Image: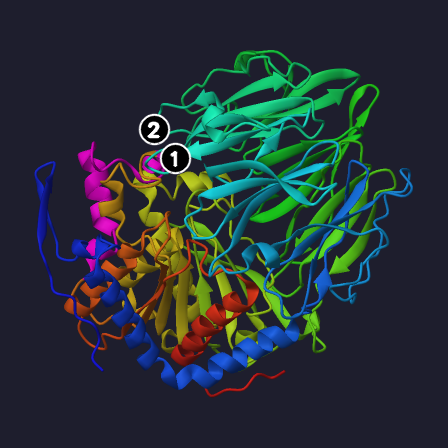
Amino acid sequence: MQPPSPAPRPVTQQHHGRTRTDDYDWLRDKESREVLDHLAAENAWTAERTAHLAGLREQIFTEIKARTKETDLSVPTRNRGWWFYSRSFEGKDYGVSCRVPVVDPADWTPPRPDGDAAPDQPALPGEEVLLDLNELAEGHEFFSLGGSSLTLDGTLLAYATDTAGDERYTVRVKDLSTTELLPDVVTGVLGGVTWDVDGRSFYYTTVDESWRPDKVWRHRLGTVQEADELVHHEPDGRFWVNVGRSRDDRFLFIVSGSKSTTEWSFRDTAQPDGEFVVFCPRREGLEYNLEPAVVAGRDVFLVLHNGSGPDFELALAPVVPTDADDWQPVVRHDPAVRLEDVDAFATHLVIHQRSQALTQLRIIELTDAGLGEDYLVEFDREVYTVGAGSNPSFDQPLVRLGYTSLSVPSSVYDYDVRTRELTLLRRAPVLGGYDPEDYEEHRIWATARDGEQVPISVVARRGAWDAGPVPTLLYGYGAYEASIDPYFSIARLSLLDRGAAFAIAHVRGGGEVGRRWYDEGKLGNKPNTFNDFVDCARHLVETGRATPATLVAEGGSAGGLLIGAVLNQAPELFAGAVASVPFVDTLTSMLDSSLPLTVTEYEEWGNPEGDPQAYDLIASYSPYDNVTAQDYPPILAETSLNDTRVLYVEAAKWIARLRATAVGRRDFLLRTEMEAGHGGVSGRYKSWHDRAFSLAWILDRMGLAETGSDR
């Protein structure tokens, strides 16, 4: 076989006096038989080039499966008189959601279900199955649950499903007393729904032609979708909308937000036909969140905002429309601590924050006089991630939290605010005698070319670095202020146990080191993201942890843009690269305001259509536009035909241009999932096979394809 070689069909465009020629944009027509045949040919070429890894792929899949407790369940979460939990079963792709009644209202200790109970046996007495996703997925190549929501009385369940991968969901309503579906069907919904407190209507959002969530609707049970009430429309193309209900059920909120500005509207649920009222009108650059609370016996809104500094402060405001100048600070802005979110309960507040590139949970106790003691929930590992879990009950005295690290499996704790005791409820099992102490993880810091210190999280088998450099997979993202915090992965063990290391480069553009970290990696500062990743790779090499001959890079979506830009800049540093659903045709996409996400992301990337400077900047780093005649390392690009966030054509064009332009090895593979979306295939077994494919290719690039797992 020979690699596919699509014919160039040049299309020339002019913007701001600049001329740009695109040879492969004809691959955009996904309805074209010629295009589909090309994607099939690329898949066949990839299969041919990786046929020698079939045995390794199957071995890795078997390892993932053997280490996973397939018949398992989650820790129950209490809400409105019920304990909710999910179950999984061996041989089943999807989970089953269940509930049992609360027996003792004064006891917040979760019951312990039987994790080995057969599918036809209850895990707890009185178990009621709410949704069996395996039944809903039957007959579909792809399945995703967008969300599910119960009425306050627990009798009706609304759930949203996607069977194409395009993230356009259909909502149905299940009567839990009869298990029958109501006639109500709502299509074209983004995600799930929010019930009104009376349980007679729910709210949902829809998207415009560019896939921007722009409308909030109200559906009344027993009516057709065409009769739904348009509650809110956001005309500004930079803004998206969302709808939700507060934890105490007192308020419904509609949020309009752009990348830099937010506006909240609220309605008291005691007034079902009342109007939504704007809390604080949008002010360019002002971001804020609202959380209802009771402080010193007074109903207030907690306002988390950036009006006093980029890393946010917490303020109080009355439960009426209030100007930002009248918000009263209670936790002032601190440039060393990024406040990210706040949850209010009857007896305490929980602040989600980060400092020194580590996540933290901060408790503020509430007293009759107001705010009481203020402290952190402490953990003693060098590298970890902690965050609040499911905490739906306003009156709960406990904080459910999740904890993990690169070597510690996902763990669920309850923190009792009354006694300050931290109780481990469950650590995700890893079968086969796994011991976190067999691995070592560290936080190291690379010096970027401009002098900035960039954190890197690394993990390997204990003692692996004692003998010198280790084959390493370096992962990065660096966009949207999204933080790639340390996390555990069973699949990753198939790398580590073959002698490889894994590292996360916490590059600028993410949020790991606060809002400054994000601001220094977007718009005109975007090149910092790519430079940081290259400098992290060089640091690993120069400090003797890795070598270019066995260093592989990986990133997905905006992280795929990162990988593409890095390979144009420093291909000699890497033995291979994996780019998943990669945003590599950045300039083309940002020039097309009709595409999903483009207008809403002008504040992330710039507007090249309206701004010559933005055009020149994006053109300077867009991976597709900057492919040159140099020797690139082997590349595996993975994409999905139905992806609405990053269209499959970006990866297809990129690989075509690489083949036509690069010199040297020219070992480029494109793998397209024909029944999937942005998140890839659905179902855990398919996803395990999918990850086994990537890991086998990575191990081959590292020279470890013939190395067996130590376990």
Spot occupied by residue 267 in the image (x, y as percentages of width and height): 60, 17
The residue that mark 2 highlights is 237
Q: Residue 508 — which label?
A: none
In the displayed structure, 119 sits above or below 616; it is: below
Quadrant including the N terminus: bottom left
Q: Which residues are magenta?
A: 600-627
Horizontally, residue 560 falls left or right of residue 499, namely: left
Q: Indicate the position of residue 50 as horizontal and vertical percent values.
A: 36, 80
Give the residue at x 76% y 51%: 413
Instruction: Check the image and report above or below for 10 versus 554.
Output: above
Are there few (<14), some (14-19), or many (20+) residues within 10 Å of tag 2? some
Dominant secondary structure of the magenta stretch? helix
Asked whether, in this view, residue 547 is left or right of residue 155, the answer is left
Q: Which residue is found at the position 21% from the left and 33% from the top? A: 611
Please tell me whether residue 620 belongs to the stretch shown in magenta.
yes
Apparent side of residue 442 relative to residue 296 in the rendered image (left or right): left
Residue depicted at 55% across the width and 16% down the height = 276
The answer to whether any part of residue 449 appears in the image is: no
- Report x, y in % for residue 181: 62, 42
| Residue 308, image x, y percentages | 52, 23
The quarter of the rendered structure image containing the C terminus is: bottom right
Determine which residue is flagged by label 1: 212
The image quarter containing residue 552 is bottom left
Query: Decide: marks 2, 1 in contact (CB < 8 A)?
Result: yes
In this view of the protein, can residue 706 be seen by the observer?
yes
Three-letter code for the amino acid on which mark 2 is drawn: Gly
Please tell me which of labels 2 and 1 falls first in the chain.
1
